[in-house]
Amino acid sequence: MSDWQICFLAASVWCGALVPFGLPIVARAAVVVFAIAAWRLRRPLLLTASLALLASAGAAAAWSDAVEPVAERTFVGEATLASDPIPNRGGVRVALSIEGRQYEASAWGSPAGWLRNRLMGEQVFVEARLRPLDDPPSWIIARGTRGRATIASVDGFSEGRIHTRIANSIRRTIESGASSMSRNERSLLTGLVYGDDRLQSPLTADNFTAAGLSHLLAVSGQNVAFVLALASPALRRLRHRQRFLAVLCVIGLFATVTRFEPSVVRASVMTGVAATGALVGTAVPARRVLLLAISVLVVVSPLIVHSTAFQLSLAASGGILLWSQRVALSIPGPRSLANALAVTATAQFAVAPLLLWRFDGLPVASLPANLLAGPAAGPVMMWGLVAGWLAGLVPGWLAEVLHVPTRLLIGWIDGVAALAARLPLADLDIAHVVVIGLAGAAALRIVGARRRFAMFGVVVGALLAPAVVSHVTPPPPVVSIDAQSSIVHRDGRVLVEVDPSSRPERVLAALRRARVGDIDLIIVRRSSFAMADLIGWIDSRHHVATVWAPELTMGVGEQVPEPGDRVSIGGSMLRPVITEDRLLLTVVGE
């Protein structure tokens, strides 16, 4: 098949998965036979039609199973953890596989304590209340969730199947070797090595989001390449067929360690396609490998087309494969810097439409941040996987020595993210992305240094435009974070009202997007340990002059306002009133 035929195949299969069409099991078996015959007879159009129909039929079957109502009942028996437990407001949240269906489960108290140290793939004996989902969005259904569960009790566990035991042993050993690190350092290590961000603080998460570096903490095809590079000395010693099987085992184990993240699954299938080509003596170009991997994955798991992580992974990979080489050749200067800039720029541009559609925008800071932090991510992953695993097997003092390079590299990446989050570069919108795309395409086609330089100037201007507009536009007087919290700009002062019900990541993101610098006053409606953490995260990024709280229990330098204190907000003079350990503001005059 030609490149265009394979591209048409991948597009057809993708569209088939988006348009479900039910087929009886007998008809699906007939289509499979027809697809095999078309492949053997070298009939690309018939093969494309067959696979697209299979993807459509598979999607219809998956959606039919997803919308089948879940009966509300009490379940007592063995369940398999389909995800790693995640801390959630004093309890844990975990995906449970019960009788072949996946449930989003929550637990508090003693059951949460039982689950907190368990890992994906392990089995637990539970009593849980099952109930259906309430009008779930398509992305929740697409990831396999069929209902919700509240866990009442947990009584014993088992470690699961052999590959799960090996994968979980690797993770636990790496985490044990990093016990001398701070919580933030451990969260970055586990995120960079195998994508586990459960220990990540909201401040770190927001810094990486603002810097466009979140993809570093979500394992990708780059991680798969590093794993194969680490295994290559042993793989070279094997014979041809043995090497093929060993490659499949290595990527299968790593996919289990990383919890089958969509980007890793995509890279693993690509590696499998390339390894199969090598086994039969056919070198498969990278573009074909990507398109074939898309086709295989979508036919096997049609609902994966609704996964945002999978879409971003494909877009970034496609952008790099299609454009990075041409862009690198057009950039003057050292080749290593030109290549790094080209890879970063093309990947960011390729994912820009998805980020603008799904999220709030594309941070301009992501380009310099990725250039600075990206080269350190690879060494952390490789060193963390090898030395990090060894650190879990040796005495503590030696583990600290082994992790000295890890700490230095992680500190650099974290510092770049924190600095980029503070840069006043704002975010690109769709108009900026269109201008950058057109100017960049013109620069690649134009002959002549001056004209090409002018097009690059347009690109730079579009990148800086959001920052200029943000600087000259006054901030809105009131920014609502949610129903309970808000940001107020008044007479050059910044006042922030926060409530414990507000999610910390939402508060931090709102302060960043509102271009808040120093904060004159934070009004805490109700004191709590969670609020103490939030105030600490806010103060680390924005200098906070005063914190008002209803009581002195948080230990963040808060003050209990006096009866005669007043504060002007939104044109009104307000006075604090403390009622039942809750701080409220009442109007006393205009």
Image (spheres, grey):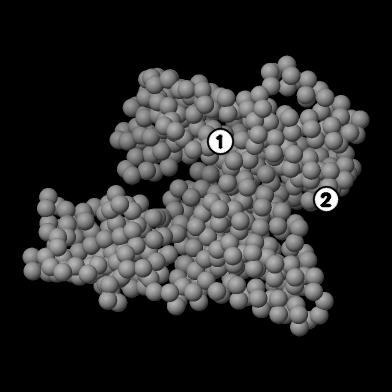
From the image, tell me which residue sits under label 2. 285
What residue is drawn where x is 78% and y is 81%?
A: 449
Q: Is residue 390 visible?
A: no
User: Residue placed farthest to the top in the image?
Assistant: 26
Q: Secondary structure at mark 2?
A: loop
Q: List x then y, in percent, for residue 516.
A: 37, 70
Q: Is residue 131 visible?
A: yes
Q: How many marks?
A: 2
- In the displayed structure, does residue 35 sit left or right of residue 537? right
Looking at the rendered structure, the kind of residue marked 1 is Ala
What residue is drawn where x is 55% and y is 74%?
A: 465
- In the displayed structure, does residue 360 sit left or right of residue 48? left
What is the crowding at mark 1: few (fewer than 14 residues within 10 Å), some, or many (at least 20)?
many
Tell which tag, 1 or 2, sits nearer the viewer. Answer: 1
What residue is drawn where x is 84% and y is 48%?
A: 3
Query: Looking at this view, is 546 or 80 the one in front?
Result: 546
